[in-house]
Image (spheres, rainbow, N blue to C red):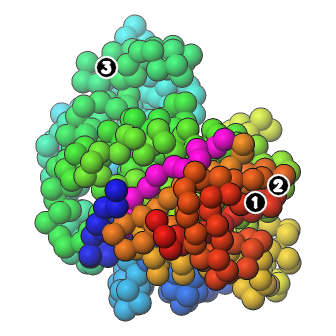
Amino acid sequence: MKKSMPKKFIWWKHGVVYHIYPRSFYDSNDDGIGDIKGIIHKLDYLKDLGVDAIWLSPIYLSPQIDFGYDVSDYRQIDPIFGTLKDFRKLLEKAHKRNMRVIMDLIMNHTSDQHPWFIESSSASDHEKRDWYIWRSGKNGKPPNNWSTCFGGSAWEFHPVTNQYYYHSFFKEQPDLNWRNEHLRNEFFDIVKYWLDMGVDGFRLDVANLIVKDKKLRDNPGFFQMLNQTQPVYTRNRPKSIKTLKLLRKLIDKYDNRMCVGEIYTLPPGDPKLAASYLGSGKNTLNLAFDFSLIFKRWNAKLYGQTIKEWMSQIPAKGWPCNVLSNHDLFRSYNRPFWRLHKRQKAIVAAFLLLTLKGTPFIYYGEEIGMQNSRLPRRFIKDPIGKRFWPFYSGRDKARSPMQWNKLRNSGFSRGEPWLPVNRNYYCVNVESLKEKKGSILYFYRQLLKIRRKNSALYAGEWEFLNDGKNGVLVYKRFNNEAAIVVCLNFTPWNKTVNVGRDWEGIILLSTHKVKKHLIALDKFSLLPFESLIVEVINS
């Protein structure tokens, strides 16, 4: 049965979000680091591409120990990116183009150079002492067995006050205590500060880590945590969801704003858990990231199972979002399971991302098929990469500068880039691929145009017609206006498809077939790695 679509286009629900890592997008002053003016300079490119919103990784004042995820002042812009005036101009220019701006919000921790922590650590009886998590040790050892997300004890001894403070990540990133009402009120004032300025939404960093066990109970062993056989006391506490509900109430006081949460899990990806942070769909997060699909082997059946599980967990009033890669992971082009036919798989994945039910998030450069960079040890900037080299080279490989053209440094900067540009920039860049029919950029542009024109794709319902059998995914997107069938061949072989319906349709887009041609959907053939979008004319 067809369901009616909402008449109003809701940007965070029906639009497309483009994730920018500001350091690496475009450098306007030739210091080798991307900046806000650089983003402004490229707004027309983003508008022409067809995105509705941009999400910026952190640009707040920071010592940059973890590249902005260690904030020392939430109300100021770090000078390496520009000024508050620059940011206001970005808001103005984006809004004039009917594009929204999402900021990263780091609720879990601050920098140890934040004035709050400096005060909190100054004396055990300071009024801000309880804004962070402080505890005395046990027999000369840390308070419990909690470890950081990178391994090793998460407790750092502070000799001035003779206690330990807790940090989920680096010792320079002490965790906030969200059980403290004064801290919560102050932080919510920061949220209002940016909303009043015109910010359209927030991506919440590690949203499910913000509250820890009040009793500081020991976590289970590592393998028990991976199997999720016991509670983990440093994440997913009930108080986290209660806190996010309060944040949602605040955000909903403003018109047409949103929040999307990163739900950090071990092992990576947990649809049920991620969806739980949507609450009823109206009272907690607007959107929540589940990363299950990113870590799946390239297999239509596995993808189908993962998609069904994710969609089944979304509350009735909720809405999914979908993502292929981000700044903390490998680029989608370099998934461990994509060793062969990478370009073809990247195009199939683009069709999937932009036609599934839910809000798509595109990581910068994904639209041109940017790949992980291979960086020698001397170029590694990521502190995780430095710590674990050579076993793990860190996150820099997915953060290399955007590849704009064939010129020096691929047009990113006339100065020395903070990270080397990927050596393949001469053939993989926006300028070279923009007019090249059949390129990854060509299909992203076409897909975004088709998505925008068809409400069944951006706002419609979803139903599998083939959930991976024989290496093919086929699903229907539909509402009271139209029905669209999407067919994706995950294999390097010809496939015959029968959707079991006596339908005919017009081809809207195909990697191999001619657009606008009529096709019978009861039985048809797909070429190797063919992707096909058809508007049904007799359903």
Q: CA distance from mark 2 to mark 1?
A: 7 Å
Residue 368 appears at what percent x and percent y? 71, 72
Q: Is residue 219 visible?
A: yes
356 w.r.t. 310: above or below:
below
**Local secondary structure at mark 3:** loop
Is residue 414 covered in magenta?
no
Percent coordinates x, y for residue 429 in the rendering: 76, 78
Q: Return the x and y of residue 166 as percentages of the image width and height.
A: 39, 31
Say which mark, if any, is on residue 310.
Answer: none
Amino acid carrying mark 2 in the image: Asn
Report which quarter residue 234 is drawn in: top left
Of the two numbered discs 1 and 3 in the rendering, the one whose residue sits closer to the viewer: 1
Name the residue tied to disc 2: 494
Q: Hey, what amino acid is under mark 3? A: Leu
Residues packed near mark 2 inside 10 Å, few (<14), some (14 to 19) or many (20 plus): few
Q: Nearer the viewer, residue 69 or 461?
A: 461
Kindly identify the residue that appears in the image at 69 percent across and 64 percent down.
Answer: 531
Query: Which circle, 2 or 3, is nearer the viewer?
Result: 2
Q: Residue at x 77, y 71 (%)?
A: 512
| Nearest to the observer: residue 426 or residue 174 | 426
Q: Is residue 238 left or right of residue 473?
A: left
Question: Neighbour class for label 3 at 10 Å: few (<14), some, many (≥20)?
Answer: some
Give 399 or 448, whichever is nearer the viewer.
448
Residue that label 1 marks: 525
Q: CA distance from mark 2 to mark 3?
A: 57 Å
Of discs 2 and 1, which sits in the foreground?
Answer: 1
How far, Cα to Cα, is label 1 from label 3?
59 Å
Amino acid residing under circle 1: Ser
